[in-house]
């Protein structure tokens, strides 16, 4: 049944406007028009605040007390998606950090099952490893890291519905392997890598299009060795992601990066762990205890272990701490990730024909409601 949302300002993916109404029918946006033009008989729900395209998070390790590595099941994926929905995330890639081939297969099967079961918001899977460089391991287990083998190519290309993203260290594989995986439709990002500028550009020519959590788990930019960071800032065709929790990267460094390359293809991610949407203060990652304190997640030696960040907070931090326009921050949370995943013909905008996956924000950029494919996920009813 069609319904209309009226009363809020609207960010349509490009600009802000007031005095417009969004009409939704069968999970799609059918019109954005003046309130006086609403078709007769269409019920209207009055809302306040800012209506924007729903956030798309391409790096979500966990939420709601669940870590995908520990619960690679349909119900585990459902719990993670539900936890992030309250923070405006209407589309996400549950993310598996470096693990065994068997656990990878379980996670892929869980995401396939979740999509088949219609779990709201699940767009695919992100395999962050194990094809990473141990010298840039971060919190990943180096004992589980390995090079891509023939069996791995079959595995990472096996999700037959939804999008697959893999993070790799390009210097530890070949251009031919990258090309084979990319040609199968998998998105490929460089991360946890010590690759040179030249190695990133070679991988780019073979099909690599993303950079996972810029600055983190990669060498710094040097005058004669630009490396992966230099390639990310220099190549406008790449999609780098940023963790704007203000712990992983300083606000000054984030501002410098955004000034260098702009926001059109820059993506906000959370790198969220199981703490988001829960009250737990610690959890296990393999055999290590990860502690939550003052917004940080760390191992006993102080190593950052993912984040306690949600997407609404990432947007607020981008506006308040980095000084970016609200429109740019919202684009980085929706339009840019939609384009990176190849979903920008149906997500990331409020426009006729697009899926009605949208978020309602108040004046403080806190989430007051979300819809996924036209269904109100906060239980407030459609109209």
Image (spheres, helix red, strand yellow):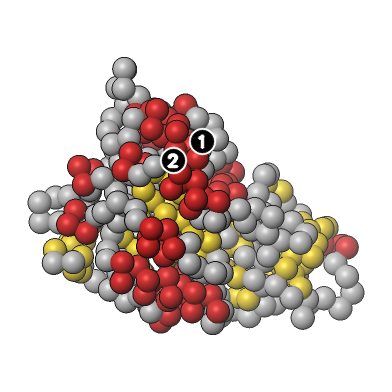
Residue 273, quarter of picture: bottom left
Task: Give the side of residue 277 with respect to residue 366, left or right.
Answer: left
Q: What's the residue at 71%, 48% (across, down)?
A: 17
Residue at the far front in the pictured view: 150
Can residue 185 be seen in this snapshot? Answer: yes
Tell me the residue at 57%/38% (across/down): 264
Structural distance between the alpha carbons of marks 2 and 1: 8 Å
Q: Quadrant of residue 219?
A: top left
Q: Which residue occupies the foreground of this view, 74 or 289?
A: 74
Give the image location of residue 376, x and y in percent: 60, 75
> Is the residue marked by circle 2 packed among few (<14), some (14-19), or many (20+) residues within 10 Å?
some
Nearer-the-camera pick, 184 or 339 = 184
Q: Which residue is mark 1?
A: 205
254 versus 89 height, above or below: above
The spot of residue 371 in percent (x, y) is 60, 70
Labels 2 and 1 touching (C-beta < 8 A)? yes
Of marks 2 and 1, which one's residue comes earlier in the chain? 2
> Residue at the top extreme?
224
The residue that appears at 49% across and 79% down in the rendered structure is 113
Residue 14 image offset from top left, x and y in percent: 67, 44
Query: Outermost residue, left direction?
Result: 301
Helix, strand or loop at mark 2? helix
Q: Is residue 8 above or below residue 216?
A: below
34 displayed left or right of 181: right
User: Is residue 52 something one can see in this rendering?
Assistant: no
**Viewer-side residue, 24 vs 133:** 133
- Label of residue 168 in the image: none
Q: Is residue 230 left or right of residue 218?
A: right
- In the image, residue 290 above or below residue 14: below
Q: Residues within 10 Å of mark 1 (few under 14, many from 20)?
A: few
Q: Which mark is residue 175?
A: 2
């Amino acid at each position: 049944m069609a319904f209309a949302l009226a009363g809020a300002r609207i960010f349509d993916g490009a600009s802000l406007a007031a005095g417009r109404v969004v009409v939704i029918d069968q999970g799609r946006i059918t019109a954005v028009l003046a309130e006086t033009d609403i078709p007769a008989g269409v019920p209207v729900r009055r809302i306040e605040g800012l209506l924007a395209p729903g956030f798309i998070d391409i790096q979500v390790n966990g939420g709601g007390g669940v870590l995908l590595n520990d619960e690679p099941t349909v119900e585990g994926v459902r719990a993670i998606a539900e936890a992030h929905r309250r923070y405006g995330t209407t589309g996400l890639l549950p993310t598996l950090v470096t693990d065994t081939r068997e656990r990878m297969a379980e996670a892929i099967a869980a995401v396939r099952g979740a999509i088949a079961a219609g779990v709201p918001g699940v767009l695919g899977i992100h395999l962050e490893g194990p094809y990473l460089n141990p010298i840039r391991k971060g919190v990943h287990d180096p004992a589980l890291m390995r090079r891509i083998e023939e069996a791995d190519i079959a595995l990472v290309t096996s999700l037959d519905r939804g999008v697959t993203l893999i993070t790799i260290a390009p210097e530890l594989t070949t251009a031919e392997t990258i090309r084979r995986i990319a040609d199968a439709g998998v998105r490929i990002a460089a991360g946890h890598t010590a690759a040179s500028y030249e190695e990133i550009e070679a991988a780019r020519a073979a099909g690599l299009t993303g950079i996972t959590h810029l600055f983190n788990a990669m060498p710094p930019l040097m005058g004669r060795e630009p490396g992966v960071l230099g390639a990310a800032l220099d190549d406008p065709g790449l999609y780098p992601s940023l963790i704007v929790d203000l712990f992983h990267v300083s606000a000054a460094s984030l501002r410098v990066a955004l000034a260098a390359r702009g926001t059109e293809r820059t993506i906000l991610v959370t790198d969220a762990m199981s703490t988001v949407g829960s009250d737990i203060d610690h959890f296990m990652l393999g055999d290590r205890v990860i502690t939550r304190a003052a917004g940080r997640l760390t191992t006993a030696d102080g190593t950052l272990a993912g984040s306690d960040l949600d997407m609404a907070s990432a947007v607020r931090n981008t506006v308040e701490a980095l000084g970016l326009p609200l429109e740019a921050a919202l684009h980085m949370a929706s339009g840019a990730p939609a384009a990176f995943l190849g979903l920008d013909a149906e997500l990331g905008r409020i426009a006729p024909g697009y899926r009605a996956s949208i978020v309602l924000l108040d004046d403080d950029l806190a989430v007051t409601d979300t819809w996924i494919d036209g269904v109100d996920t906060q239980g407030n009813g459609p109209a």
